[in-house]
Amino acid sequence: MRDVYIIPEERHKISEKATILVIDDEKAMRDSCCQVLTKDGYRTETAEDGNSGLRKIREIKPDLVLVDLKMPGMSGMELLEKVRDIDPNIVSVVITGYATIESAVEAMKRDAYDFLPKPFTPDQLRIVTRRGLERRALALEAAKLQQEKQKMKENFITLVTHQLRSPLASIQQYFEIILEGFAGDVGSRQKEMMEDASKRIDELLKLINDWLNMSRIEAGKFVEKFESVDLAPILSEAMELLEQMAKDRKVLLQSNFREGLPAVQGCKEGLKQALANVIGNAINYNREGGTVTVSTKEQNHHLVVEVSDTGIGISQENLPFIFDEFFRVKTKETRDVTGSGLGLPIARRIIEAHNGSINVESQLGKGSTFRIILPKENAEDE
Amino acid sequence: MNSKTKILIVDDDLHFVKSIRSVLESREYIVDAAHNRESAMEKIKNIRPDLILLDIMMDRLDDGFTICYKLKHDPQLRKIPILTISAVTEKTGFKFSPETDGQYFEADDYIEKPVKPSDLLKRIEKLLK
């Protein structure tokens, strides 16, 4: 019945190109498998233990691996797990001389696709291999469809934001021209109102931008740009961006971190945006004459950035929602604060895309401390 | 003083064209406009503008780049200064400028939308010198 899924031509293509890796400590086993499979037109590779098997998997990206369960060194079970981590679409078939129900179940739990008890005939090997490769073709097809769907979603968002922005940009352009006097004289009251209107449009444009950013993070765009990042200059840049805003709101922005922090893996632009959002939030929800302090510390394998403010604080009932999309605290004190309600959610998504986390402690009327926790670059190797 | 200087605006946003046209006409430039790649190329050949204001994303997202490339590789048209006006950076986050990407993007100057009229006029005057 499996044959229904694949047209013969397609299957022919797979068998022509497919690479099969045989991992077994017995030379006779490796040789006989390869002999059968090579004759059928597959490309074959071999490895005599788990470690060299893994190396080859990373190098040659096989379509299917035949794994012996009992090998010296890394066990077949362990190997299965690692194969799944490298590429879940690589099909693993277990071969073993000690076929028990338990070992079969254990192997299946680790995503092995099929089971081949020793001794087996060339025909049994052929059937299992072919079935495994058909399964891989299906999995790859599904992954491709998923990708296409994702792409359509992204294109849709880009299209919609473009449609929203264009008319706003036009309005903005008209305002510029009128305000500069190219369409005749403008009275001072008219000018004031138009300047206000223009500001409101700026806010709307920013909201659309935030929305677009949000969808970009959803699409996992940041991870593609990961590199080794020194956070100190990024913090400084983020703070520079906000200096004017701090001045306008009469908030003192101070830093308390040193150069040469341990590196983290990440996307510079993304991290800068996340940090700027959190610091900007601390400035926005502050009071005249208040301060915002940005500091860093190391905690085992993590780097922690602390943003403390002497602002209005967040009440216990609002605290759980502070990172939710479009949530905004509505009180007397926040009435004059404009924002999209997306600053902190965007920051959280970016930080989480970096395998980090963000949390907040707050006292109403006293201020809040946001903590951004990022794993150090070399933490995994230690 | 500009009454013999012809400027062609190439942009698919009719509102943008209308607003910029009023700015240019206030300085007595002769203004014409094209709203897509094909009509832009035709008008450039026929009216031989002294300067082109060029949008980048039109029907196709790279129309502006294409027009710019064609002009700068045409021995007769390459001398016409091109001032690109676009919201590409704001829309896509993709940053570029003739200074850093001159090899691929040979426009003579580049500004972002929305445009400050006084800034636009200053840049136009500089390019026409």
Image (cartoon, coloured by chain):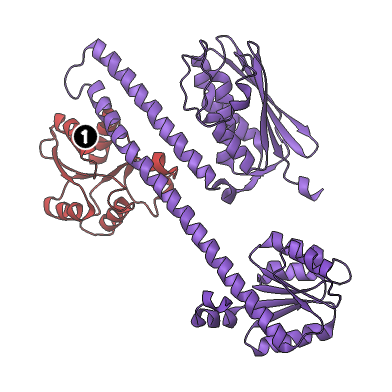
Q: Nearest the camera: B22 or A288? A: A288
Left or right for B46, reference A177: left
Q: Which quarter of the picture shows residue A205?
A: top left
Amino acid under disc 1 = Ile
Residue A146 visible at all: yes
Chain A rendering hue: purple
- The spot of residue B117 in percent (x, y) is 26, 29
Does residue A3 sit above or below B17 in this rendering?
below
- The spot of residue A330 in percent (x, y) is 51, 17
Residue appearing at x 38%, y 40% in the figure: A161
Specify the farthest residue to the right: A72
Left or right for A358, reference A200: right
Q: Nearest the camera: B7 or A199? A: A199
**Mark count:** 1
SS category of the residue bearing label 1: helix
Work out which quarter of the rendered image holds the N terminus of chain A and state it: bottom right
- Near mark 1 (Cα within 10 A), the count class, few <14, some 14-19 or many ≥20, is many
Image mark 1: chain: B
Q: Nearest the camera: A197 or A25? A: A25
Left or right for B129, reference A365: left
Residue A271 visible at all: no
Residue appearing at x 58%, y 9% in the figure: A289
Residue hosting label 1:
B20
Q: Which quarter of the picture shows residue A70?
A: bottom right
- The spot of residue B102 in percent (x, y) is 39, 50
Does residue A17 sit above or below B107 in this rendering?
below
Q: Which quarter of the picture shows residue A132?
A: bottom right
Residue appearing at x 49%, y 61% in the figure: A145
Residue appearing at x 67%, y 73% in the figure: A64
Left or right for B120, reference A35: left
Chain coloured red: B
- The spot of residue A325 in percent (x, y) is 52, 32
